Amino acid sequence: MAKLTGKLGEWQLPSVHMWKDRRAQIQWTRRPLISPDTSVATIGSCFASEIAAAMGRFRLKGAMHPGGLFYTTPSIRQEIERIFGGWPQYRDEPAWKVSEGYVHPFKSYYHAVPDADELRAWSDRMDAEADRLFRSADLIVITLGLIEAWMNPATGNVYRQIPHPEAFRSLGARFYRVTMAEMIQDLERIRAAIRQNTRAEIVLTVSPVPLQATLTPLDVRVANTESKSRIRAAVSEFVERYPDVHYFHSYELVTTAERFSDFMLEDGRHVRPHAVDYILGQFLEMFGRDGVRAPALDTSWITPPLKTAERPADTRPRWRRMLERVRRRRRPVTTDE
């Protein structure tokens, strides 16, 4: 049992961790899931791509979804369901005609081809590759990035990002922000599809990369805080509800660091390469089985937290401290009339 001490006395509790006792490394419980031959599939935001790229450096067997980035729970849910035979509305979206040819509404808008049939064939190859990766995966890592989404009101389909500018005006897509309740529903459907079709373990992460832009009237910093807060809260509730789904604290490693700049480049949005390696190393420490460990990494760049006193030292002049004590001793005078 752990001991909690306060002004009222002491408590014996199953778990206690004080702010003053925090360390550079976040506390976690080891859950050995990854062996040298474990197949890892990742899907999600740009942080998922950085983690997937680092897998090769750590000699892990895994890859990211070949279709690119998925930022929101509904876009990830649609794709996971498509992989396992769901999402019938997927085929209801026609290709978009742009000046460079045709682009796919649910894949990279930078891939334009002159013929719609050629685009469809390319899309089918990408889908088949994604299907093989996720249907054979032993571990699926899902990284959630933001809550701002665009929906086709006619089909209910959610796009991975704001639609191509040449299709945007005629499309009539509706902008909305995904709620916590909607995210939890999406995660439940994702879990159900994976559980019904694979034996893969599921790990959720939250991207520490801030929004590049918000499409709301809010300051981007306010919008980013709201976005990450909703996502993190939804993931917290979901993991508590389903203990067979695991959480990895990539978001906290970056955002609760003593110095944010230790982990982020000067733009404040992209994680430094050596920080990505450190985060993946922590991932392997948490989820790696015997024989799977991260190589020794230089961590001297991480600023360790300083132990803080229970109460900050009072640096005010002595006369001001005495005056404050006198004020606290005064009692309000009341009269009954």
Image (tube, helix red, strand yellow):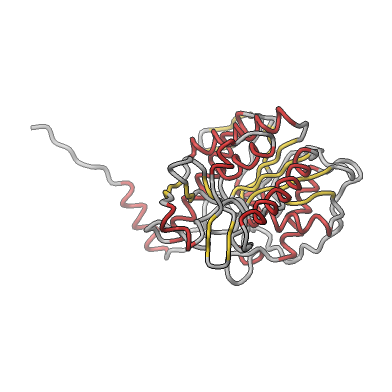
What residue occupies the far bottom of the structure in this picture? 266
Quarter the C terminus occupies: top left
269 relative position to 277: left or right:
left
Q: Which of 258 and 323 is in front in this view?
A: 258
Q: Which residue is drawn at 87% across and 42% down?
A: 35
**Which residue is drawn at the image coordinates 41% and 58% (left, top)?**
169
> Residue placed farthest to the right in the image?
291
Q: Using the rendered image of the protein, determine whether residue 32 is visible from the camera's viewpoint.
A: yes
Where in the figure is residue 174, as x and y percent of width and height? 42, 49
Q: Position of residue 323 (x, y in %)?
A: 34, 58
Q: In the image, what residue occupies the spot 71% across and 37% down? A: 202
Q: Quadrant of residue 3?
A: top right
Task: From the viewer's side, name the closer residue of 155 and 114.
Answer: 114
Residue 240 coordinates in the image, percent (x, y): 61, 31
Farthest-out residue, left? 337
On screen, residue 139 above or below 99: above
Res. 194 image quadrant? top right
| The quarter of the displayed image where residue 110 is located | bottom right
Q: Residue 92 in the image: x percent, y percent? A: 54, 42
Q: Which of 119 and 148 is in front in this view?
A: 119
